[in-house]
Image (spheres, rainbow, N blue to C red):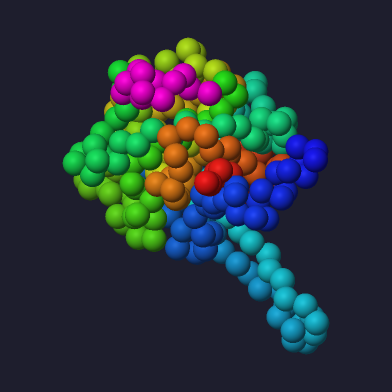
Amino acid sequence: MSVLTELATAVSSGRIEVLDLTAPLHHETPILALPEQFGQTQPFELHEISRYDDRGPAWYWNNITTGEHTGTHFDAPVHWVTGRDGQSVDQVPPPRLIGPAAVVDRSADAAADPDFVLEVEHLEQWQAEHGSLPEGGWLLYRTGWDARGDDPAAFANADESGPHTPGFSVECARWLAEETPLLGLGVETVGTDAGGAHSFEPPFPCHAELAGSGKYGLTSLRNLDRLPPTGAVVVAAPLPIVGGSGSPARVLALVERD
């Protein structure tokens, strides 16, 4: 039996479970709001073209408007100024859309402190227990934030000082970009950086460090609680938008079950 036939058989039998890590995409999907002086992304909207009526008697279809970075989405290197000479989303090689996953669970820390940031020492502790971070793989950062995903206000968790959501320290972002063989990071929050990363020095370290190193980001993930710390394989499928800085994506995980 070929490897691909064996894979298909394992999926159809349930020995490999296919988990959807993608948030539903609709007009109330949380989006990132920037300060008023900056350009803003559009929320997702469907615009009906026809629905079995005089505009089209046998078919239903829609136009859509949205930003590239709406809902569960893929960040390409060109998204940030540090990666301006890097890949746009259509230039990402297809093999780099598939990779093993390391799932780091700090949901208890994030529940206690919404501004919790992951440090290098936390990942060194994880590696001491589970082994090295996977070459050509994804670090998926579980914080429990996906439980807020159907409530935009709770998801943003903002006050007069700005949003309060978990993320990565400056040192950790730099270490992940420069010292690990990862493809990129995946998070449950609206962006790869912590909500307070605008005040970090330098600001927005995940965006800056990952893009500058040619690595990728996945955001607004769900169901990370159903993944093992190691062993899952992630398939991230953004639209190949020519020149695009990113794209909404369907993100799947393959998990072997007993």
Q: Which one is in front, 134 or 44?
A: 134
Specify whether 108 is left or right of 88: left
Q: Which quadrant of the structure image shows residue 86? A: top right
Residue 149: give x, y in percent of width and height.
Answer: 39, 55
Residue farthest bottom in this picture: 54
Q: Considering the image in quadrants, where does the N terminus appear? A: top right
From the viewer's perspective, is residue 23 above or below residue 176? Answer: below
Residue at x 30%, y 41% (from the top left corner): 107
The x and y percentages for residue 217 are: 52, 34
Residue 81 seen in the current view: no
Picture residue at 46% right of the left edge, 43% below the top: 227
Left or right of residue 57, residue 82 in this image: left
Q: Give the quarter of the image for residue 187.
A: top left
Identify the image quadrant of residue 12.
bottom right
Answer above or below: position of 228 versus 93: below
Q: Find residue 141 and report its horizontal and vertical position in percent.
A: 40, 36
Between 181 and 35, the one lying in front of the other is: 181
Left or right side of 138 for 34: left
Magenta part of the protein: which range?
122-134
Image coordinates of residue 184 in percent, x first then y, are 53, 28
Q: Residue at x 78, y 44 (%)?
A: 5
Q: Is residue 30 magenta?
A: no
Compared with 235, 156 (above or below) is below
Is 131 left, or right, of 8 in this rendering? left
